[in-house]
Amino acid sequence: MFENWLAHYGVKGMRWGIRRTAEELGHITEGSSRGINAVANMKRRGSKPTNPVAKKMTDDELRRVINRMNLEKQYSDLTRKDTSKGLETAKDILGIIGSVAAITVAGVNLYSSLRYGENPNENTNEKKK
């Protein structure tokens, strides 16, 4: 009876009579803290865009952390595979096709040698002599 039935029971976590702003819902608006003017919005509100953990670190600790992060990024850039998923799949398929082709050629050679009693790779002129 109801094959195409759609039921909607509201937004999860939403309470009756409570209105949420676009920022609370996670939408980016012009005045949003995640918008283009994020730093300006933070300054206006009195907060700072710096990481609070970094403020508690000494200069040497911060240098070591930054140096480590830069080294890890350089390593990942150097060892990253530039092949895409599609290219890897194509290589796998072509490898399988090559294997199937080799098996087929071997089977044809075996069939011919059994049927005709000769090696198809040998030169037929030499055999007649």
Image (cartoon, grey):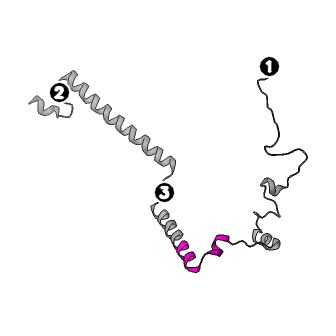
Q: Nearer the viewer, residue 125 or 45?
A: 45
Instruction: Name the residue beneath numbered marker 3.
Output: 82
Q: Where is residue 124 in the image (x, y as percent from the top left)?
A: 16, 31
Label 2 vs label 3, nearer the camera: 3
Relative to the observer, which residue lies in front, 5 or 24?
Answer: 24
Q: Residue 22 in magenta?
A: no
Q: In which quarter of the image is residue 122?
A: top left
Question: Which labelled disc corresponds to residue 89?
Answer: none
Would you place residue 124 above or below residue 23 in this image?
above
Residue at 30 percent of width and 33 percent of height: 105
Res. 118 mark: 2
Tell me where residue 29 appears, x and y as whole percent. 81, 60
In the displayed orientation, state which residue is furthest to the front: 56
Specify start and end residues of the magenta stretch as a single range.
Answer: 51-67
- Type of amino acid at the residue the image marks with label 2: Glu
Task: Look at the magenta stretch and give its main secondary structure.
Answer: helix
| Quadrant in the rendering for residue 40 | bottom right
